[in-house]
Amino acid sequence: MEKKIFFWLVCISVLLATFSSCKKEVIDNEPIAEEEETVEISDPFYAELTETSTLDDYWAIFVADAIRSGKPDPGTGRVISVFFGTEPDFASGVTADHAGRAYNICDENTVSFEIIKSFWEDFSIVQRLYTFYHEAGHARYKYRHPCESYECTVAPEDYPVMWLSVLPANTPLEEFIKDKDNFFKRNWDGVRYFNCDIQ
């Protein structure tokens, strides 16, 4: 009898070992390649922009954007001067948060502004759009900042294009599109203009 029990124990052990080895899970050591998320710019005006786009390319987009927003061509009848400057040009009180400067704001015959080249080279396309529209807002539409640095006590919930500093590199394009729509509608908290009536 002991031999029979021993025999059955051996048989059961062999069967269990055989069945358990058939249930092995397939282990895939090869990592699953994650598909890289690419941001596709669906707006045809902005889809043309690349890291090598020039200030003239940005001006063309600004003009097209103004027109599609119901504004007249912002360059009609004006001398356009958009150029790169360097940091020493900004030694007279402009802070490091500012990446450009507008000139001749009250001259109806010009649109003139500069962008600090070293800032521009480090900016994302969205930061470049904000910076370009911001300086064009001063030079063409006489927009001022909603507040100056000594007046700003709290940051706004929604940063307008004319805010006095550059937004982070990870600011999404959709945020810019919303802000530039308000920019062309002149619709944001603290909208102010340069007074060109003072002589």
Image (spheres, rainbow, N blue to C red):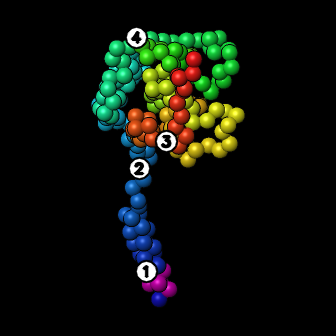
Height in image: 111 above or below 168? above
Residue ID at (57%, 17%) = 199
Q: Nearer the viewer, residue 48 or 158?
A: 158
Distance between mark 3 and mark 2 Cα atoms: 55 Å
Residue 67 is covered by the magenta coloring = no
Q: Is residue 107 left or right of residue 48?
A: right
Badge 2 local density, few (<14 within 10 Å), some, or many (20+)?
few
Residue range highlighted in magenta: 2-8
Q: Is residue 132 visible?
A: no
Distance between mark 3 and mark 1 Cα atoms: 86 Å
Q: Type of residue at label 3?
A: Trp
The x and y percentages for residue 198 are 57, 21
Q: Nearer the viewer, residue 72 or 131?
A: 72
Residue ID at (46%, 31%) = 126
Distance between mark 3 and mark 4 Cα atoms: 28 Å
Distance between mark 1 and mark 2 Cα atoms: 37 Å
The x and y percentages for residue 29 are 44, 46
The mark found on residue 188 in the picture is: 3
Badge 4 local density, few (<14 within 10 Å), some, or many (20+)?
few
Which label sits in the foreground, 4 or 1? 4
Task: Identify residue for label 2.
Answer: 28
Height in image: 33 above or below 141? below
Task: Identify residue for label 1.
Answer: 8
Task: Identify residue for label 4.
Answer: 79
Residue ID at (45%, 73%) = 13
- Verify CB contact (< 8 Å) between mark 3 and mark 2: no
Residue ID at (39%, 72%) = 15
Q: Is residue 98 visible?
A: yes
